[in-house]
Image (cartoon, coloured by chain):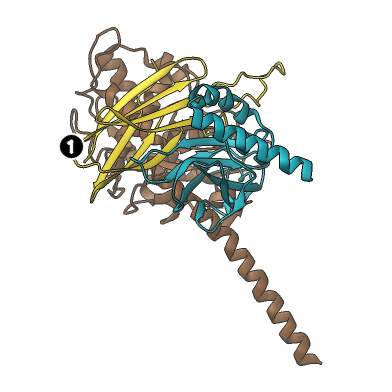
Chain colours: A brown, B cyan, C yellow
Amino acid sequence: MKKIVIALGLIGLSAFALAQKSSSDSIAEYRQMLQDGNPADLFEAKGEGLWVQKRGPKNATLEKCDLGKGPGVVKGAWVELPRYFADTGRVQDLESRLVTCMQELQGFNADEIAKTPFGKDEQNNVTAIATWVAAESKGMKFNLSQSHIEERKMYEVGKRIFFMRGGSHDFACATCHAQDDKRIRLQDLPNLTKNPGAGNGFGAWPAYRVSNGQMWGAQLRLNDCYRQQRFPYPMFGSDVTIALGVYMGVNGKGGETVAPAIKR
Amino acid sequence: MQTRRETLKHSAAVASLLAASGLFPQYAQAFEKAAFEAKTINEAIKSMGGAVPVESKDVTITGPDIAENGAVVPFGASTSLPNVKRVLLLVEKNPSALVAMFNVSPDVEVNFATRSKMGQSSDVYAVAITNDGKAFFAKKEVKVTLGGCGG
Amino acid sequence: MADPMRIRAQAAGDKATVRVLMSHEMESGQRKDGTGKIIPAWHIQDVTATLNGKTVLTAEWGPAVSKNPFLQFTIKGAKAGDKVGIIWKDNKGDTRTDEATVS
């Protein structure tokens, strides 16, 4: 009698285990099916065009924009950002650096672009260009510099911010993203404190979100994280967002970039 | 039941007649909008010139078992049947069942892929309509789930 | 004019597989705005594919096709260097044509 009960129990458990595996395999299959034909391509194409298009009050292109590897060098720039820039005296991520270039080279007003809501006007262009720049580093590995004191400082700031609990729900980034094998409903939560989570998680944005058909850059992704944590919105290109980028990017060193990715 | 079947046969016969008489293109224009407004699978197929569809191993539908988000669900519809004139993709539980319709020409393989919105978990159909107005289908159950907060 | 499409056409033997990404809102007509009014349906209705100018495929789409639609099909008898054209027309009468060379 005891043997039968144990046997039945084991069968029950294994069936349960199989069912569990199935769901997450099915989701992985769904995601795989969407890889070919990522609408991010459309934004990539737009961004590529914007890079060489004469625009703004100065009627100039962005072809002399220095993303850290020299004016106009786009390949490989993404996997080294955020980094320190001597001309602005600060550590910048891709999107804030693009806005700097749009101001210096094309005559746009950086503050105005920063204040523009995501999905509107020049922010759309920033997102498109960021998508293209990230795509130009496809297949490369993250290799952020920590040689400048400001870069090291931002890493430490990012780390503290990552673990800082606050807001009405006492959330921190770490609440969701500092452990392995966690998920919310069907979303696996990457552990952003180390690889592979850091490289994959940080390296997935800009990404196309199928749920709303929008292209999201890292700035918007972080903005939305803060919204979910019930924190006030960080400003576009703020030190908070850049510091977090440095923290995750350095944690993700050696991880392969997958941007622009496709997400639910 | 019998009355309905006869009515449908009649519709199919009418459709075939019209097709044969060359009035099809004009008739097709009126067809199309009605088809996309049809609420049920059979209604949509009927307005696309097909009889009540029968299941066939020669029609294939590919798609995920679970869609993480119903806004974008990838599907493939193909068939090895001869004399196919149209291929339809339908989601049973959508407000209007018909998603897309492909007109087959001798220059393309009868194999199409696109992405559909799904309002909820539902059976999804690939239907091949042949030149003589017969309709053959394959179906697949797709579960739709809204994902979590991140990702 | 609407944003450009991305068309990739790859030859394999005597066929070419064509993959297209179109930029379109594909508003279903089911959603309501903030005031409770239905946002009108706005979607691609007709799609035509050509090979060196000759129509090889026509399709009709309803509002259920996903936003920024993806389409894949295979053209028989196509080879590298051939031109694949895609034209779409939406229910507001807007249209877009793009071309790609089979590689």
Residue A15 appears in the picture as rendered:
yes
Looking at the image, the residue that sits furthest to the right is A1
Residue C69 rendering spot, x and y as whole percentages: 46, 33
- For the residue carrying disc 1, how many other residues have a C-alpha within 10 Å: few (<14), some (14-19), or many (20+)? few
**Residue in view at x 71 percent, y 76 percent:** A12
Secondary structure under tag 1 reads: loop
Residue C68 rendering spot, x and y as whole percentages: 46, 31
Could you tell me how many numbered marks the image carries? 1
Q: Nearer the viewer, residue A200 or B138?
A: B138
Residue A55 rendering spot, x and y as whole percentages: 28, 13
Q: Which residue is mark 1?
A: C81
Q: Image quadrant for the N terminus of chain B?
A: top right
Taking the image as shown, residue B105 lies to the left or right of residue A106, namely right
Residue A5 rendering spot, x and y as whole percentages: 78, 86
**Residue A31, relative to residue A65: is it above or below?**
below
**Residue in view at x 72 percent, y 86 percent:** A7
Q: Nearer the viewer, residue C31 or A79?
A: C31
Q: Amino acid at mark 1?
A: Gly
Label 1 lies in what chain? C
Q: Nearer the viewer, residue A254 or C103?
A: C103
